[in-house]
Image (cartoon, helix red, strand yellow):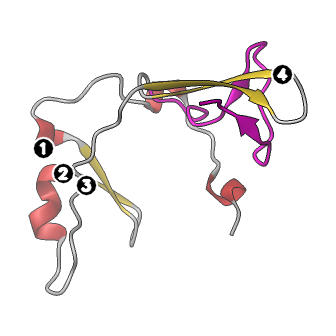
Amino acid sequence: MHTADFEYALPEESIAQSAVEPRDSSRLLVTSDVSDHRFSDLPELLLPGDLLVVNRTRVRAARLVGKRVGSEGIVEALSGGRPRPSAAAPIHRDGIAVHYDARFDLGA
């Protein structure tokens, strides 16, 4: 399996800019039959023996600045804030994407 297996085009207008109210009216995709539902439909969608995992972690905004190992190239990675498909990808200060297996020194 490769990370490229999980890359897909996501139009900007499909990315939520804020949480919907009421929260249980948020959209829910059922992958077994690729059907759209609302989160409030979840109790009716669960079958006996299904496992529901709740993730209550929070995303902490972070900015990492470092140097590419073997060069003087400055690299910056941002997390948190407005979601976008490339949010986890480190970028050179000049806006060039960094290759996935590049190595960085983030200092101490």
Question: Dot 4: few (<14), some (14–19), or many (≥20) neighbours within 10 Å?
Answer: few
Q: Secondary structure at mark 4?
A: loop
Q: Quadrant of residue 103?
A: top right
Query: Mark 4 and mark 1: span between their CA atoms?
Result: 46 Å
State yes or no: discs 2 and 3 in contact (Cβ < 8 Å): no
Which labelled disc corresponds to residue 55? 3
Residues in magenta?
A: 83-108
Q: Residue at x 80, y 42 (%)?
A: 102
Give the mark nearer the N terminus: 3 vs 1: 1
Give the mark nearer the N terminus: 4 vs 2: 2
47 lies left or right of 100: left
Q: Residue at x 68, y 70 (%)?
A: 1
Mark in the foreground, 3 or 1: 3
- Give the total number of marks visible in the rendering: 4
Query: Mark 4 and mark 2: span between their CA atoms?
Result: 45 Å
Front position in the image: 10 or 56 = 56
Mark 4 — residue? Answer: 73
Mark 2 — residue? Answer: 39
